[in-house]
Image: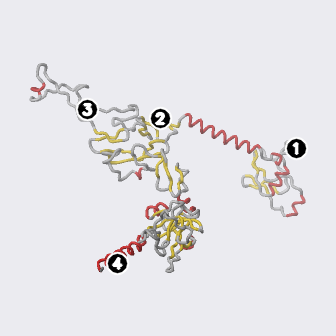
Amino acid sequence: MKEFLCILLFMCIMTTSAWGATNCRHFVPTGGEDTSQRAYIERKRSGEFFYCGEHSGDDNGCSNRVDVWAKGGSGLGFYTCYVSGSGSSSWAYTNPISWISDCTNDPETEYYGHNMLPETDGTYWFFYDWDSRSNGGAIHQCKISPSTVDSYLSECVSSGGSKHGIWCSCYSPYEDDGPYKCRLAAKYGYKPCNSDADCVRIDNTKSPYRHSTAWRCWQQNPGVKVCTPKACENGWHVTNGICKQDEQQQQVVYVEPGVQRQNHQQQNPVQPSPSPTTNTRRQQSCTDTVYMDEHCQCTRVAETVNYGGKCKCVDLNKEIQNGKCEYTAAYRARLSTDIDNIYNTLKSTAAGFKKSEWKDSLGNFNTARLASDSIAGVVLGTVGGIVTANVIKKAQIKQGFEDIKCYIGGQSIANFGDEFVVGH
């Protein structure tokens, strides 16, 4: 009898222990539960629920004061579980704007530091940590407004990407230029750059920089600049954007007729007189022998670089002409067209000015306009001299114009009311 009671007590203890262990996780109810009870709250994915308190028969239950993301009666958001001693547990919604703080970092940093909800309530993006104390739930929530996200993604689309949530997605031929914008991708593993200052501390053990010792910023293709080697380790030379090993010096050995090669190798070789075929030299194969030097570098014409095995001008609007980089005929023609367009626009604008203000109905010079502008302090330039005044009624002398005079070359020529002619 005692053994039976002990076994029964042990089973009760085991049942109680299992009953008290809860996991705040979503689940699909089975057995015909009434999910309309206040202890249930539906996850955004239809048919899955969270349960507030101890759920009968399993471990699917959330502890007191645990927050979950769900779509309750107040809409999508965080809901808090309140466990009542009387068994009337329920979920309560609190407006996230009022109690969830703003995130302290940018969206990308917050994402790698927290979990992020895959959906938004339409006003914020939410981040959170798992609550390990209650086997689930959310803690340390923070929020970021869409306008804040847009400020970080402001250059995404214009730089060649597309916006997806808080991310900027860059597709070929573009690549990430930081977390929120794109740039044209550099080919063949070269490091992108804007100037020579960006081409430092490069790992010369990996392609395409093996055996290089110094680098420069070079335009790989329109819109893309990359760091390329400009100097190599001893025994290596720069060619076509990489360091290539120098070819071994070759010696041509003269062997007397009838002497076997193996016997001759044991003797001192006889060197013939130097000739073009027996000279010791390093073999080089340059793709542009006209403008490349003996090291296959584009040094014979200033402002040129190796582009696809050919020496071309750094400025894409120029080409090599007469031993230097000069603007192409197409570029000069385009400039000429632009100048003509500007000239025609100015000419058309000038043609619309009111010419009648300076000419009368007969096409003669409008002296009345000249007189009024002269009194107002306007100086008119004409062929043969500068006229500052003309016919004025004597009555105006008594109205404060006594001090108006005409000066030419700094000398007073006439007083107010005088008539004069300036000759050539």
**Could you say whether the residue bearing mark 3 is in a helix, strand or loop?**
loop
Quarter location, residue 243: top left
**Could you say whether the residue bearing mark 2 is in a helix, strand or loop?**
strand
**Could you say whether the residue bearing mark 4 is in a helix, strand or loop?**
helix
37 left or right of 346 in image? left
For marks 3 and 1, the one nearer the N-term is 3
* Residue 238 rendering spot, x and y as whole percentages: 34, 41
Camera-near label (1 vs 4) is 4
Q: Quadrant of the C terminus?
A: top right
Q: Which residue is mark 4?
A: 9
Q: Residue furthest top?
A: 258
Near mark 2 (Cα within 10 A), the count class, few <14, some 14-19 or many ≥20, is: some
Q: Which residue is mark 1?
A: 361
Q: Which residue is mark 2?
A: 320
Q: Which residue is mark 3?
A: 281
* Residue 419 rendering spot, x and y as whole percentages: 85, 51
